[in-house]
C-alpha cells in the first residue's frame, strides 16, 4: 500500500462493508460494521474503540451480520473499467410525470461492484445525449466540489438506460459526497436533481485464500490455524495493494493478536483454552479495525467459523493394583493414561493427574506417569489416581477417569525399655511398653531379652516374656552376667516389622562361692562341723579371688523352712574361708556373700549334713 493510500485510509470516514457492496474480486461474504450496536454474540468480542484512538486488538460488541465465506477470492482483485456486468441500478421505464419531455432520473448511486464509479438511471422522450454529476464533500471546513462528466451508456437504451461515469480519479480524498446529477436529451431538454444521493468513496478490504482449520477440535487437534491474505482496493485509483503490518484480532475463546506480513498474508496458530470442561463448540474469528476521518472506527470481519468440540473417553492403567510398603516409606503409583480415538486406545501425553490433594504429575512420553504422596501413610488404605479435576489443568478434550490401588503398610513396632536396673541379686528389672505405628498393639506380644558385651555386636537372646494386652510389661528376670548392655526384641510378621527397644547399660560385677563343703559327714552330735569354700569375682571373662570379704554361714534344720545365720568369716587374700560350728541336728549348710557397691550377691552350693 502506498504512503498516500495509507494516510488516506487513516483519514477515511465511517464505512459499512457488506455483502451487497462487493469490491471487484472481493470475497462477498466478508462483512464489516461501523461502530456496531451491542449484541449478545460473539461473547468474547470487545466493543468499539474510542473515537480518537482506534484499537487493533478488540472486536466489536455487535459483529456484522453473517459469517465470512470459506471460499477464497482471486489473488488480485483489481476491478476492470468498464465493469464486466451491468450495474444494479435500473432505468425508470416510465415517461416524465409532468409531460414536459425533460429527462427524469431513476436510481443514482455508486456502482455496486466498484465505488470508484457513479451510475445514473435516466429516461426522456428522446435520446439522452449528456449526463454529468457534481460531487461535493460532506466534511471539511472548505468542502470541494468535483464535476464528473464522460458518462457512458452501460445498459438499456439512450432514451431509457443506465449511465456510468469514468473512474472518479479526480476526487480530492476519500469520504462521503453529496451528489447532484444533470442530464440533457437530443431535444435540448435538460434537468438537474440536487442532492440526488450520497455516496461513500473509501478503500475496501479484499480477502483471499481464507482458511480456518481443523474442522473439529479434539484431543489430537487442539490448535486452530487461521490463514489468508488481505488487500485494500482503492476506488479512486482502481489499484489493489497488500494490507501489510495490520494488527489482527483473533478470538478463539480468548483473544489473541497477529500482524499481517508484507504481502498482506497472515498465518496464525492458536490453542483455544476451552471455556469450561463441557464445551461443545468454539467460535473462532479474525478481524481488524479501520479508523475513519470522522473519528469513528469500522470493524472488519475477515473470517469466522464455529468449530465443534469432540471429547474422547480416557482411562488409567496402573502398574500394580496393590503395594506393600514398610512404615516410613511413601505411597507411590505408576502407570499409563490413555484415550480412545478412532476405536483405538492411544497413550496420552501431557495429561495432569492427581493422587489425593498433594500428589500431582503430568504424563510424559507413552502416557507414563509416577505419583508419590509426600506424606507417610500410617495404616492400610486405598488410593485413587485420577485425571485432574482442576479447571485450569484438566484436559477439556478428555473425559475424566480414575483408578484405585491398595496400600498395605507393614507397621513399625515400637518398644520402650522405659525403666530398668540390676539389683544385688543380679535380677534385671524390666518395665516399659510396646505399640505399633498404626496406634495398635501388635497381636504377637512376645518380647525377647537380648544381651551384648559392647552394645554393638554379639547380641544373644536370654529368654522371652509376653507383654500385657495393652502392650505394657513390668517384671524382673535373673541374669547370670550382670555387666553389659540389654535390649528387647520383637520378631516381625506379615503386617508388623521386627522391632528393637533402646538399649540399657549396667556394670555390676558377678561373684560366686566355689568348693563349699560342710563336714565331716555324718558327724556325731556335739562334735564340730567345719565349713570351707572360696569367694571369687568375675574379671573380664575370668574368675579371680575375692579376698577380705565377709561370708555368712546359714543353716536350715531338717523339716524347717527358715534359715538361721550361725556366723560369718572373712576370706583371705586367696578368697578362701573356714568356719567351725557345733553339730546339733541334721540340716543344710550354705555360704552367702552379701554384695556391697557394684557387686552382686553370691550363694554357695547347699550341703546337707547328717548328725547322729
Image (tube, rainbow, N blue to C red):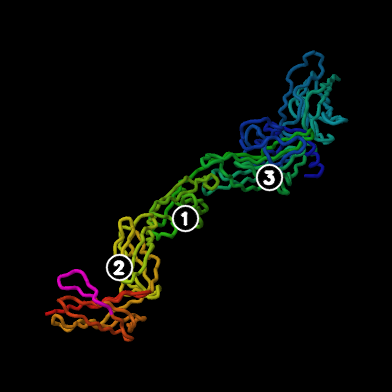
Image location of residue 170, percent across then percent down? 84, 35
Horizontal side of residue 583 vs 81, given as left or right? left
Image location of residue 91, percent across then percent down? 74, 23
Q: How far apart are the alpha carbons under marks 3 and 1?
A: 57 Å
| Image position of 309 with respect to 352: above or below | above
Say what secondary structure mark 2 lies in: strand
Residues 574 and 470: in front is 574
Residue 209 sits inside the magenta stretch:
no
Q: Residues within 10 Å of mark 3 (few under 14, many from 20)?
A: many
Say what secondary structure mark 1 lies in: loop
Residue named by callout 2: 477
First in residue order: circle 2 vs circle 1: 1
Quadrant placement of the N terminus: top right
Q: How far apart are the alpha carbons under marks 2 and 1?
A: 42 Å
**What range is drawn magenta here?**
554-568
In this rendering, the count of numbered labels is 3
First in residue order: circle 3 vs circle 1: 3
Which marked residue is nearer to the observer: mark 2 or mark 3? Answer: 2
Horizontal side of residue 373 vs 112, given as left or right? left
Residue named by callout 1: 375
Q: Residue lying at the far left in this picture: please name it.
A: 612
Quadrant placement of the C terminus: bottom left
Q: Residue lying at the far right in this picture: please name it.
A: 142
Please identify the quarter of the rendering in which residue 154 is found.
Answer: top right
Q: Residues within 10 Å of mark 1 (few under 14, many from 20)?
A: few
Residues 236 and 549: in front is 549
Residue at (71% x, 46% y) in the render: 264
Q: Residue lying at the far front in this picture: please name it.
A: 526
Amino acid at each position: 500500500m502506498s504512503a498516500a493510500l495509507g494516510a488516506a485510509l487513516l483519514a477515511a470516514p465511517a464505512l459499512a462493508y457488506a455483502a451487497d457492496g462487493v469490491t471487484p474480486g472481493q470475497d462477498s461474504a466478508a462483512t464489516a460494521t461501523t461502530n456496531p450496536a451491542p449484541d449478545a454474540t460473539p461473547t468474547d468480542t470487545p466493543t468499539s474503540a474510542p473515537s480518537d484512538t482506534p484499537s487493533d486488538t478488540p472486536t466489536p460488541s455487535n459483529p456484522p451480520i453473517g459469517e465470512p465465506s470459506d471460499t477464497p477470492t482471486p489473488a488480485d482483485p483489481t476491478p476492470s473499467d468498464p465493469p464486466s456486468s451491468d450495474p444494479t441500478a435500473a432505468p425508470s421505464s416510465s415517461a416524465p410525470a409532468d409531460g414536459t419531455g425533460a429527462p427524469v432520473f431513476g436510481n443514482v448511486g455508486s456502482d455496486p461492484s466498484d465505488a470508484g464509479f457513479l451510475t445514473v438511471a435516466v429516461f426522456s422522450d428522446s435520446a439522452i445525449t449528456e449526463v454529468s454529476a457534481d460531487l461535493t464533500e460532506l466534511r471539511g471546513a472548505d468542502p470541494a466540489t468535483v464535476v464528473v462528466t464522460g458518462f457512458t451508456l452501460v445498459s438499456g437504451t439512450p432514451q431509457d438506460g443506465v449511465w456510468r461515469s469514468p473512474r472518479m480519479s479526480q476526487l480530492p480524498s476519500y469520504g462521503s459526497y453529496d451528489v447532484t446529477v444533470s442530464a440533457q436529451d437530443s431535444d435540448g431538454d435538460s434537468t438537474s436533481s440536487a442532492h440526488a444521493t450520497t455516496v461513500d468513496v473509501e478503500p475496501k478490504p479484499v480477502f483471499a485464500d481464507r482458511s480456518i482449520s481443523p474442522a473439529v477440535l479434539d484431543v489430537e487437534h487442539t490448535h486452530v490455524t487461521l490463514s489468508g491474505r488481505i488487500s485494500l482496493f482503492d476506488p479512486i485509483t482502481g489499484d489493489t495493494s497488500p494490507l501489510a503490518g495490520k494488527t489482527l484480532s483473533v478470538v478463539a475463546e480468548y483473544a489473541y493478536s497477529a500482524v499481517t506480513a508484507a504481502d498482506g498474508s497472515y498465518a496464525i496458530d492458536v490453542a483455544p483454552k476451552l471455556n469450561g470442561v463441557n464445551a461443545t463448540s468454539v467460535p473462532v474469528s479474525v478481524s481488524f479495525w479501520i479508523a475513519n476521518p470522522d473519528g469513528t472506527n469500522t470493524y472488519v470481519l475477515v473470517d469466522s467459523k464455529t468449530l465443534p468440540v469432540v471429547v474422547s473417553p480416557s482411562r488409567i492403567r496402573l502398574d500394580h493394583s496393590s503395594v506393600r510398603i514398610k512404615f516410613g516409606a511413601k505411597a507411590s503409583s505408576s502407570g499409563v493414561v490413555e484415550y480412545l480415538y478412532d476405536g483405538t486406545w492411544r497413550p496420552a501425553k501431557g495429561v495432569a493427574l492427581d493422587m489425593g490433594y498433594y500428589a500431582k504429575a503430568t504424563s510424559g512420553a507413552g502416557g507414563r506417569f509416577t505419583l508419590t504422596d509426600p506424606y507417610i501413610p500410617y495404616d492400610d488404605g486405598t488410593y485413587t489416581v485420577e485425571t485432574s479435576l482442576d479447571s485450569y489443568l484438566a484436559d477439556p478434550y478428555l473425559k475424566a477417569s480414575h483408578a484405585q490401588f491398595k496400600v498395605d503398610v507393614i507397621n513399625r513396632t515400637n518398644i520402650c525399655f522405659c525403666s530398668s536396673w540390676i539389683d544385688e541379686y543380679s535380677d534385671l528389672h524390666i518395665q516399659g511398653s510396646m505399640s505399633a505405628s498404626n496406634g495398635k498393639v501388635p497381636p504377637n506380644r512376645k518380647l525377647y531379652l537380648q544381651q551384648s558385651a559392647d552394645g554393638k555386636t554379639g547380641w544373644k537372646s536370654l529368654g522371652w516374656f509376653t507383654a500385657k494386652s495393652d502392650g505394657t510389661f513390668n517384671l524382673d528376670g535373673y541374669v547370670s552376667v550382670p555387666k553389659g548392655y540389654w535390649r528387647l526384641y520383637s520378631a516381625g510378621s506379615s503386617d508388623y516389622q521386627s522391632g528393637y527397644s533402646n538399649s540399657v547399660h549396667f556394670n555390676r560385677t558377678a561373684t560366686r562361692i566355689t568348693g563349699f563343703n560342710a563336714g565331716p559327714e555324718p558327724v556325731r552330735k556335739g562334735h564340730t562341723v567345719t565349713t570351707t569354700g572360696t569367694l571369687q569375682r568375675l574379671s573380664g571373662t575370668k574368675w579371680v579371688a575375692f579376698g577380705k570379704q565377709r561370708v555368712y554361714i546359714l543353716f536350715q534344720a531338717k523339716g524347717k523352712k527358715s534359715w538361721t545365720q550361725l556366723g560369718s568369716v572373712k576370706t583371705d587374700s586367696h578368697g578362701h574361708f573356714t568356719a567351725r560350728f557345733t553339730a546339733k541336728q541334721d540340716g543344710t549348710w550354705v555360704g552367702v556373700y552379701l554384695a556391697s557397691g557394684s557387686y552382686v550377691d553370691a550363694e554357695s552350693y547347699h550341703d546337707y549334713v547328717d548328725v547322729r
